[in-house]
Image: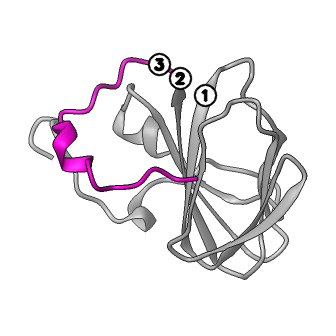
Amino acid sequence: MPGGRYWVKRLDELPLVPTDDPDDYDWYPIQHHFGLSAFGVNAFGGDAGTSFVHEHDETVSNQEELYVVLRGTARFTLDGDELEAGALSVVAIPDPGVRRAAVAVEDATLLLAFGAPVGSGFHTTWRTEHFERVPRAD
């Protein structure tokens, strides 16, 4: 860590948020640990049946959220639709009004979560011509 300008760490090297509940998920407070402020990012780990994301929407915070299943399988409920997402699946929720929840389906499931308010100031530095032939999700 050269003066706190960057770090390279394995996820399992990060501290966990302490809990007294043995049924609670493992919470890796990535954003807090590294002092990030442009977006929220956390990771959650747990066995089958562990609730990672309790049902909610982001209408008050106006956040877009993105989840990446790093290991295992998670069942997402999005506006009442149940969908299973296996390892390396990306679940993008740009609409803050979507009700969402996520539960581990397999033991040792690991979920990475990102969020930031819509219009929070992000501007890509990539040129638009890079994406001319890249379709948007439908």
**Residue type highlighted by circle 3:** Gly
Disc 2: which residue: 118
Please report contact status of discs 1 and 2: CB closer than 8 Å, yes or no. Answer: yes
* Local crowd size for mark 1, using a 10 Å CA cut-off: few (<14), some (14–19), many (≥20): many
State the SS at label 2: loop
Counting residues from the start of the chain, the first of labels 3 and 1 encountered is 1
Depth check: 26 or 132 in front? 132
In the image: residue 11, left or right of residue 4: right
| Residue drawn 44% across the image and 31% down it | 39
Q: In this view, does 37 lie above or below 138?
A: above
Residue 132 location (% of width, % of height)? 26, 48
Residue 57 location (% of width, % of height)? 78, 33
Q: Quadrant of residue 97?
A: top right
| Residue drawn 44% across the image and 67% down it | 12
| Residue drawn 69% across the image and 30% down it | 96
**Residue type highlighted by circle 2:** Val
| Residue drawn 55% across the image and 77% down it | 87
Q: How far apart are marks 3 and 1 (CA)?
A: 9 Å
State the SS at label 3: loop
Residue 114 location (% of width, % of height)? 51, 43
Disc 3: which residue: 119
Q: How many marks?
A: 3
**Residue bounds of the magenta highlight:** 118-138
Depth check: 135 or 80 in front? 135
Q: Which mark is residue 43?
A: none
**Residue type highlighted by circle 1:** Gln
State the SS at label 1: strand
Q: Which mark is residue 63?
A: 1
* Local crowd size for mark 2, using a 10 Å CA cut-off: few (<14), some (14–19), many (≥20): some
